[in-house]
Image: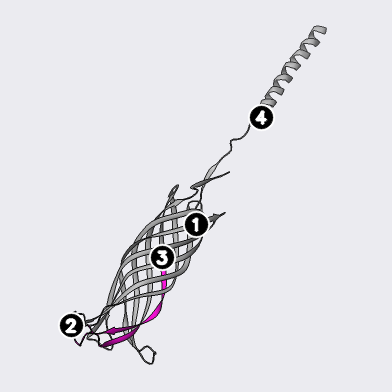
């Protein structure tokens, strides 16, 4: 009887010890920590862009005081553009703030036959433009949707031609005008410091009063030819590639 009792106690001790050891081992087991990378848009960047633009030009035969205005019609000066941009962005949570300066060469050309003077063609060319803007956007990791707005300037050129022969009859007038710009873009970070975007911008440019003189083809050079108040808006679609100096990724637990 004593032997049986001692054997039973011993067996219970072995089972209890094994169970306790198993509980002790399991109590120190930890689930693995999952760490994912979150794209960071903060930092300075520089890049290049290219695309297409259209400048809407409307000419009003006028005088400086605006005493009379006769519409000569409108045309779209269209063509390609290429340039670069430099800027800085700061990210707070999912909100991204930024500033940017952009400068582009352009080749936007267009013309229309004057309505009141059908013997004459009014021609326009945009040679370059620039923007200085602020940005605000929302980031989904490495995808950024942003709005921009600020100041814009264009470098324009105007001429008059004969409809019948295409001969230039006025002097060439170069003009730089200031205005405003608003835009929207979608940018994707495809590498730690590289991103690509597509952007649309609309420029609201000031009206300008332009005085032309004869170039000597039909009348003595330097004599009065015409004066026009020229209205201008510009639409742009560009593809952009940027390289950024800043935190490429940050840990997110």
Contact check, label 1 and label 4, Cβ < 8 Å: no
Tell me if residue 61 comes above or below residue 134 in the rendering.
below
First along the sequence among labels 2 and 3 = 2
First along the sequence among labels 1 and 2 = 1
Tell me if residue 211 comes above or below residue 233 in the rendering.
below
First along the sequence among labels 4 and 2 = 4
Q: Secondary structure at mark 1?
A: strand
Screen quadrant of the N terminus: top right
Dot 2 surroundings within 10 Å: few (below 14), some, or many (20 or more)? few
Nearest to viewer (mark 4 / mark 2): 2
Q: Nearer the viewer, residue 143 or 151?
A: 151
The residue wearing badge 1 is 89
Q: Based on the displayed image, in which of its 4 quarters is residue 120 positioned?
A: bottom left
Contact check, label 4 and label 2, Cβ < 8 Å: no
Q: Position of residue 79 (x, y in %)?
A: 30, 68
> Hey, which residue is sitting farthest right in the picture?
2
Q: Secondary structure at mark 4?
A: loop
| Marker disc for residue 164 | 2
First along the sequence among labels 3 and 4 = 4
First along the sequence among labels 1 and 4 = 4
The residue wearing badge 3 is 200
Q: What secondary structure characterizes most of the magenta part? A: strand
Q: How far apart are the two marked residues, 3 and 1, measured between alpha carbons?
A: 19 Å
Q: How far apart are the two marked residues, 1 and 4, measured between alpha carbons?
A: 45 Å
- Specify the segment rendered in magenta: 202-229
Nearest to viewer (mark 1 / mark 4): 1
Dot 1 surroundings within 10 Å: few (below 14), some, or many (20 or more)? many
| Marker disc for residue 28 | 4
Q: Based on the displayed image, in which of its 4 quarters is residue 170 positioned?
A: bottom left
């Amino acid at each position: 009887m004593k032997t049986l009792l001692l054997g039973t106690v011993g067996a219970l001790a072995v089972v209890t010890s094994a169970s306790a050891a198993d509980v002790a081992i399991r109590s120190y087991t930890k689930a693995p920590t999952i760490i994912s990378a979150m794209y960071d848009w903060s930092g300075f960047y520089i890049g290049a862009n290219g695309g297409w633009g259209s400048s809407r030009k409307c000419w009003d035969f006028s005088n400086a005081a605006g005493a009379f205005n006769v519409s000569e019609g409108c045309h779209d000066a269209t063509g390609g553009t290429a340039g670069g941009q430099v800027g800085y962005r700061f990210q707070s949570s999912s909100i991204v703030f930024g500033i940017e300066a952009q400068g582009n060469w352009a080749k936007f050309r267009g013309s229309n036959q004057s309505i009141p003077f059908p013997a004459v063609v009014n021609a326009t060319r945009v040679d370059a433009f620039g923007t200085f803007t602020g940005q605000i956007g929302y980031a989904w990791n490495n995808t950024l949707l942003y709005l921009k707005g600020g100041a814009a300037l264009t470098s324009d050129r105007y001429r008059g031609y004969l409809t019948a022969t295409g001969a230039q009859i006025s002097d060439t007038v170069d003009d730089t005008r200031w205005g405003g710009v608003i835009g929207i873009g979608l940018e994707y970070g495809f590498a730690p410091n590289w991103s690509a975007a597509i952007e649309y911008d609309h420029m609201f440019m000031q009206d300008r009063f332009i005085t032309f003189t004869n170039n000597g083809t039909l009348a003595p050079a330097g004599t009065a030819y015409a004066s026009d108040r020229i209205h201008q808006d510009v639409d742009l679609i560009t593809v952009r590639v940027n390289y950024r100096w800043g935190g490429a990724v940050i840990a997110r637990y």
